[in-house]
Amino acid sequence: MDLELTGRVAVVTGGSLGIGRAVARELAREGVNVVITARRQAALEHTAKEIEAETGSRVVPLVSDTTDTDSVRAMVASAVAELGRVDILVNGAAAPSGLVRNSVEEADPELLLADIDTKVVGYFRCAQAVAPHMKANGYGRIVNIGGLTGRSSHALSGMRNLAVVHMTKALSDQLGPSGITVNTVHPGVVETEHIHELYEKEAAKRGITAAEVEADFVARTPIRRVLTAREIAEAVAFLASPRAAAITGESLGIDGGLTRGVFL
């Protein structure tokens, strides 16, 4: 399917690694010029060169911190200066500390705040910064990368992903009349640089091996495998395209069937 994305411009936060990098690569394959942004310049430059060489699209690496409003605004201004416009925002930044999984007695409130500041308020900062440009163009796509912990109770900072869903719905109402859609994608267990750290942590907690943790995830997933980052990226690219113009305010789980709940 032709996604009709050639010539569009995207900003991908958390774009140097993992799902963010896969999303940037997939958009570039579709002819999108992409700004990738994260905290580390070296990782951004490496990823930008790699994707440019592979796809021929332009990829601009810009350092920013989504917990800093001025940093976000400066990054978006630089993106517009470099590429002329912003049509697509993919929010994928995450706190360096990761999910807060401890019990209520052991959890660090400061880590929880940092997680929410990055993943919820940070996503809002980015949406707020790009919205005027999208409104001026009469076209915009915002895709927020959430997580399945928003649909379960096993990690305290799953509250961030539930908050992202609420924000997505609120922004979809506000921005829809300007031709801007806003959706959330919840990835399941995905093969990235960090997945093996998760396996190790779970293994230590449960007194089993990392391989056994992975096997347990696979056994509980109806498709019987771990997902690839590209599978997430392909769904994001569709939501970022004109083909998805009628889809907004939605929360899409891409988890191979791992989540058994029914969400209306």
Image (cartoon, rainbow, N blue to C red):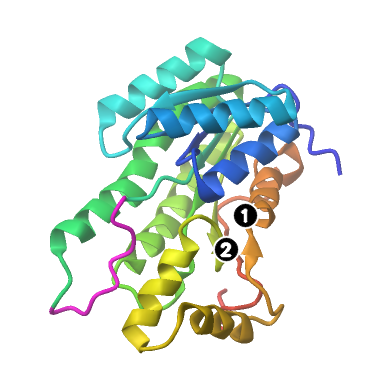
User: In this rendering, does residue 139 appear at all?
Assistant: no
Expressed as whole percent of the image width and height from the top left, the position of residue 59 reads: 59, 24
- Cβ atoms under marks 2 and 1 closer than 8 Å: yes
> Hey, which quadrant is residue 192 in on the image?
bottom right
Is residue 98 rendered magenta in the image?
yes
Please give the residue where the numbered disc 1 appears in the rendered image.
229
Sequence order check, earlier mark of 2 and 1: 2
Expressed as whole percent of the image width and height from the top left, the position of residue 51 reads: 64, 31
In the image, residue 205 sits, relative to residue 131, either above or below, namely below
Q: Magenta span covers which residues?
A: 96-105
Q: Nearer the viewer, residue 125 or 29?
A: 29
Residue drawn at x 32%, y 50% is 95
In the image, residue 176 sits, relative to residue 250, either above or below, namely above
Locate residue 215 relative to residue 130 in the image: left or right. Answer: right
Residue drawn at x 69%, y 80% is 224
Instruction: Say which mark, if any, is on residue 60.
Output: none
Expressed as whole percent of the image width and height from the top left, the position of residue 94 reads: 38, 50
Q: Amino acid at mark 2?
A: Val
Locate residue 92 relative to residue 118 in the image: left or right. Answer: right
Q: Quadrant of the C terminus?
A: bottom right
Residue drawn at x 55%, y 85% is 216
Q: Amino acid at mark 1?
A: Ala
Question: In the displayed image of the protein, which residue is found farthest to the right?
Answer: 1
In the image, residue 93 sits, relative to residue 80, either above or below, namely below
